[in-house]
Amino acid sequence: MPELPEVETIKEALNRAVNGAVIQSVLIAERRFRIPIPDDFATKITGAAVKYLRRIAKYVIIDLDNGLSIVWHFGMSGRVRIISRDNLASFTREKHDHVIIYTNKCTLVFNDARRFGLMTYLKTDELYASTLFAKLGIDPFDERLNKQYLFSKLKDKHIPIKVALLDQSIICGIGNIYASEALYLARISPLRLCKDISLHECQILIGAIKTILQKAILAGGSTLKDYRQPDGSMGYFQFQHAVYGKEGMSCPDCQCEICKTGGIKKIIQAGRSTFYCNLLQK
């Protein structure tokens, strides 16, 4: 699933491509997503101009000049392609190209093989009241995310810190890859219970989360399976992973002997893979 850095990368590419564009027509080949595309989706957005693009958690929001916003989530396998006007004549629909939005600047293609994503519209001034966003926690880059906030959310929880980082009602946007990487950078074991994380460690962890996410955004995200940037290129942060996907290997900051320690560990927490160094992370 595209996580925050991947969604931020997609959002920035879309911003460069369609900010200020007018939506001319919409082709919907498949409506059956996690939330079905509304029957009047094409009618509601056709003729509107794109005012602003932003990200909320793992969603791309396209604000229009008619008071509506397109809400776009990429699920497990969703991809976006941006087709320039010069290349539109040679454009051929691919399997699983479910939604095509034609604008006066370019064409946007939403491809989602598993259809776990969604595309819908909401009134712009009612976004945060919707069921999609009402219970979201603070964005990792929000100034309100500080050690006091995080400590207050963790101090009474008897669950592992890694599991809590995936709870979108605490901090929104962090996914499995970046939770493992941030905990490694913070030198905090994913097995530690939230109630045992100190106020000082909360400060360290927040810094690690922001550092990892910023580096991943600069690298265009991580391509492990389906994710591609809108221009078709890979993300490159997977080449900077310290622990994720590296079971049995040595981590970059450890001097341990793999033959004795077994290297980076992999465990399953809440149904998700966690990678960590049990020597450095305490």
Image (tube, rainbow, N blue to C red):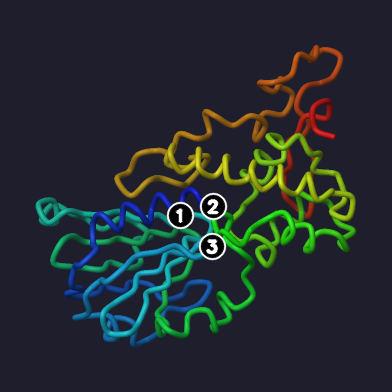
The location of residue 177, given as percent across then percent down, is 62, 44
The quarter of the picture where residue 250 lies is top right
Q: Look at the picture and state if 208 lies above or below 173.
A: above
Q: Amino acid at mark 3?
A: Ala
Pinpoint residue 77: horizontal percent, then vertical percent. 49, 54
The residue under the point 84% across, 54% down is 194
* Labelled disc at residue 57: 3
Residue on which the image places disc 1: 7
Where is residue 103? Give x, y as percent: 18, 68
Q: Nearer the viewer, residue 192 or 201?
A: 201
Residue 3 is marked as 2
Circle 2: element type: loop
Q: CA distance from mark 1 to mark 3?
A: 9 Å
Dot 3 crowding, Cα within 10 Å, few <14, some 14–19, many 20+:
many
Instruction: Kindly report the distance in space between the C-alpha atoms of the residues bearing marks 2 and 1.
Output: 6 Å
Considering depth in this image, is 192 or 77 the residue closer to the camera? 192
Q: Which residue is rendered at x = 37% and y = 74% of the image?
A: 70
- Circles 2 and 1, Cβ within 8 Å, touching? The answer is yes
Say which element carries label 1.
helix
Q: Horizontal and vertical percent for residue 257?
A: 80, 12
Q: Amino acid at mark 1?
A: Val
Q: Earlier in the sequence, mark 1 or mark 3?
A: 1
Real-space CA distance between mark 3 and mark 2, rounded to the nearest whole angstrom: 9 Å
Of the image marks 3 and 2, the number of the one nearer the N terminus = 2
Mark 3, secondary structure of its residue: loop
